[in-house]
Structure formats: structure tokens, C-alpha cells
Image (cartoon, rainbow, N blue to C red):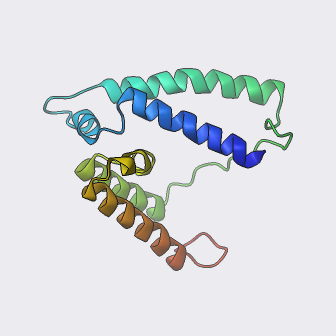
Amino acid sequence: MLYLIGLLSGALFGLGLVLSGMINPAKVLGFLDVFGAWDPSLALVMAGALAVFAPGLWFWRTKHGQCVLGTDLPKVAAPVIDGRLLLGASIFGAGWGMAGICPGPAIGLAASLQWQVGVFILAMGAGFWLVGRLTVAGSGKL
């Protein structure tokens, strides 16, 4: 059941990305071009998603306290802003700004069979592998 809920959630997320046009790298780059031909539609998509998500999360946490499958909702630790987070965010942001693609839309764009998307996905996979290799076993630290 857990896998089915994950699959349906991912499919709904992907459908939202496709319908909003957010898998189009030109649309994302237009959002990032704040001093040129800025396209605010990505911000509107994010605001719409938060408008649906935030009240639902608040309601679910206050009324139920458990996931749909009956397990406790995970506790989220207070964010720690450290060098590792800043470096990762900088690399992610630079890649997003150069390509206009991030991991979620990249999977959707794979169906386009564009070689550039394939290169992006290979680089993303290499980054995941590299972080796994550099992370000290069990500590979560590089």
C-alpha cells in the first residue's frame, strides 16, 4: 500500500508539473531572468501549491497526527544551515540556472528523448552516487 500511495503521489506531482508547464526549461529560465523578460508563472504555481498543501497539512497534523497508513507523521528536525547545505544549495542553484531543469521535471523530460536531458539525468545520478560515496557511513556528514 505504501508503494501505491507513493506512486499515486508522484504521478499527481508529475501531472501538476506537466499541466503547469514547469517541465519546460525555457519557462523556468524565464522565471530566473529577474532583470530581463521575467515570467512570474513559476511563483504563481508554487503559491498555488502552497495554498493547497499548507492548510491540508495543518488540518491533518492537528486532527489526525498519523499518516494515511496509520503510522506517526515524521518529526522534522529544526533546519541546520551549515557549509554543507550552502554548498549543495549553490551547486543546485547554479545547475538549475544553467539548465532550467531540476530532478522532478528531468524525469518527466526523459520522455522527450532529448540528449541534453539524458546528460542531465546522468550528471544527477553521478551527483547522487558521489554524495553517497563521500558521506561518512551513518553520520550524514561529508
Q: Please tell me whether residue 60 is drawn above or below residue 97 in the rendered image.
A: above
* Residue at horizontal 15 percent and vertical 33 percent from the top: 35
Q: Please tell me whether residue 63 is drawn above or below residue 29 in the rendered image.
A: above
Q: Quadrant of the N terminus?
A: top right
Q: In the rendering, at what x and y percent does residue 95 appear? A: 30, 55
* Residue at horizontal 25 percent and vertical 38 percent from the top: 32
Q: Can residue 75 be spotted in the picture?
A: no
Q: In the rendering, at what x and y percent does residue 116 appear? A: 26, 57
Q: Please tell me whether residue 98 is drawn above or below residue 133 in the rendered image.
A: above
Q: Can residue 35 be spotted in the picture?
A: yes
Q: Please tell me whether residue 11 is drawn above or below residue 109 in the rendered image.
A: above
Name the side, left or right, on which 92 lies relative to 97: right
Q: Nearer the viewer, residue 100 or 112?
A: 112
**The quarter of the displayed image where residue 70 is located:** top right
The residue at the far left in this view is 36
Q: In the rendering, at what x and y percent does residue 137 appear? A: 64, 78
Q: In the rendering, at what x and y percent does residue 60 appear? A: 75, 27
* Residue at horizontal 60 percent and vertical 69 percent from the top: 140
* Residue at horizontal 54 percent and vertical 73 percent from the top: 132
Total marks drawn?
A: 0
Name the side, left or right, on which 110 lies relative to 39: right
Name the side, left or right, on which 112 lies relative to 78: left
Name the side, left or right, on which 30 lies relative to 75: left
